[in-house]
Image (tube, helix red, strand yellow):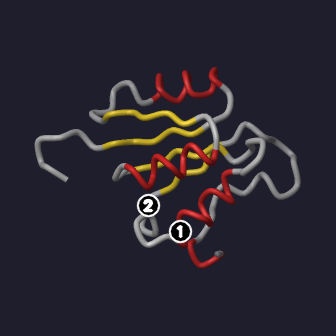
Amino acid sequence: MNILTKPLILIVDDKPTNLKALRALLSGVEAEIVEANSGNEALALMLEHEFALVLLDVDMPGMDGFEVARTAFRLERTRNLQVLFVTAAVGIPGRSCGLYRKTDQ
């Protein structure tokens, strides 16, 4: 990464209001924010760009956040991505864990 360019942060959520909220939370961060509305779109963007951080919704239709992370960690280009899981889900079995280790692949 060129020292003069801003780092890229990818925010991934299927709900536009959540993307808007995440963008607002990051408004003070010196970074370029890129949005994805699905797991498939996120993976395509991960292969196209070098992200400093990915904020990834856990509960999405189709490919959920854990599946996106597992897939990304298996690929050479995206294996070292820094991923932070985000969820509004409360009390859903198997969805309340926000920590995913790369060794859990």
Tell me the residue that label 1 is attached to: 73
The residue depicted at 54 percent of the width and 46 percent of the height is 42
- Few, some or many residues within 10 Å of mark 2 (<14, 14–19, 20+): some
The residue depicted at 81 percent of the width and 42 percent of the height is 90
Q: Amino acid at mark 1?
A: Phe
- Does 12 sit above or below residue 100? above
The one of 42 and 101 positioned closer to us in this rendering: 42
Q: Which structural element holds mark 2?
A: loop
The C terminus is located in which quarter? bottom right
- Does 79 sit above or below residue 37? below
Q: Amino acid at mark 2?
A: Leu
- Does 37 sit above or below residue 85? above
Q: Position of residue 16 (x, y in %)?
A: 63, 23
The one of 83 and 61 positioned closer to us in this rendering: 61
Q: Position of residue 13 (x, y in %)?
A: 63, 36
Tell me the residue that label 2 is attached to: 81
Q: Which structural element holds mark 1?
A: helix
Q: Position of residue 64 (x, y in %)?
A: 72, 51
Q: Position of residue 104 (x, y in %)?
A: 65, 75
Residue 30's label in the rendered image is: none
Spatial separation of the CA atoms under disc 2 and disc 1: 7 Å
The residue depicted at 42 percent of the width and 67 percent of the height is 80
The residue depicted at 72 percent of the width and 51 percent of the height is 63
Could you tell me if the residues under marks 2 and 1 are in contact, i.e. CB atoms within 8 Å?
yes
